[in-house]
Amino acid sequence: MNCHSLLLAGYCCAFFLSEAAYAERPAISEDRELKKIDLTGWDCLDRLEGTAKTPDGVERNRLKNRNAANLAGASIEKMDTAAAFLRAAAEFEAGTKGKRRNDLSAAQRAILDQREKQIVSLTGYLVLAYAGPPESTNCASADFHDWHLELFEKPSDHPPRPGDPTAIICEITPRVQNDLYRAGIRVQELAAFIRAPDLSYEPTGHPARRVRITGQLLWDDDHNGVADVGTTVRTIGAIGYHNPWRSTAWEIHPVTKIEVLDSPAVDTMND
């Protein structure tokens, strides 16, 4: 076998192994709603870096595990639409597509450091919400997990599918969940669909609610490739994930506050 054949065989082997790993369904929490959680039973409470093994992973996890922002007197950058959020990110993204934190130039690094200190509010429609998988951020716990909120410019009467626009991602972390729960936030009352532990979609029985989500900016460079970031959903994976699934690697993480901007409406799609 010549060198070209060996290289091709190695590539194919790596590809299929990667596909097999991707197709394996992660262990997802049975949670379908926010609840009061006792953080004293969490072995990751005092480990802001989680179980990250690399410097960029440690940095990213520490940002994800920040406490809720103090909004009293804070300068909040208000974005009334997903388009406004993307415009604010466009200049930085133009030079950082596919890059990770350790790839950035000094100038890009300075911009990143400043932007990740910013508190923003984003208005949109909460089409989809779901318990996140075990992550190094949360020491690989299935029980103490983030909540992923997929916020869209417009409401939708179906879960994301090929041809649909992608979302802006906002995340509720275990460290802020109790605050939002006490404030009366319930994802089943706000989202049009919940993704279940088996990765199927469950309708909540009402349209997506229009909300304003406030929190701290984060550049999740762990999801900065073409498989994750794009303007339009291209495919549905073997286990149900839509790809790409986000409009940008920038997200609101952690979420500090959620405000409901419309009145509850009855879903008449099946009437």
Image (cartoon, rainbow, N blue to C red):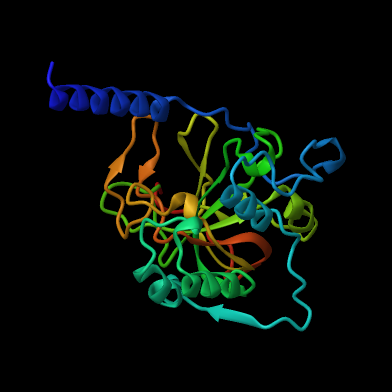
Between 38 and 123, the residue placed more toward the observer is 38
Which residue appears at 34% of the width and 28% of the height?
A: 19
Where in the figure is residue 152, as x and y percent of width and height?
Answer: 44, 62
For image coordinates 61% across by 59% down, the residue present is 253
For the point 14% across and 27% down, which residue is it?
4
Picture quarter containing residue 242? top left
Q: Is residue 219 left or right of residue 228?
A: right
Residue 258 visible within the image: yes
Location of residue 51 with respect to 214 vertically, above or below: above
Q: In the drawing, does residue 234 fall left or right of residue 79? A: left
Judge by depth and name the residue closer to the eye, 7 or 39. Answer: 7
Residue 207 appears in the figure = no
Residue 176 appears left or right of 5 = right
Image vertical order of residue 222 relative to residue 67, above or below: above
Residue 241, image x, y percentages: 40, 39
Q: Residue furthest right?
A: 40
Where is residue 243, by image quadrant? Answer: top left
Pick the residue in front: 112 or 139.
112
Q: Position of residue 65 (x, y in %)?
A: 70, 53
Identify the residue at the far front of this view.
Answer: 3
The quadrant of the picture occupied by the N terminus is top left
Residue 255 coordinates in the image, percent (x, y): 65, 61
Outermost residue, top side: 1
Quadrant in the rendering for residue 258: bottom right
Pick the residue in front: 116 or 152. Answer: 116
The mark tally for this picture is 0
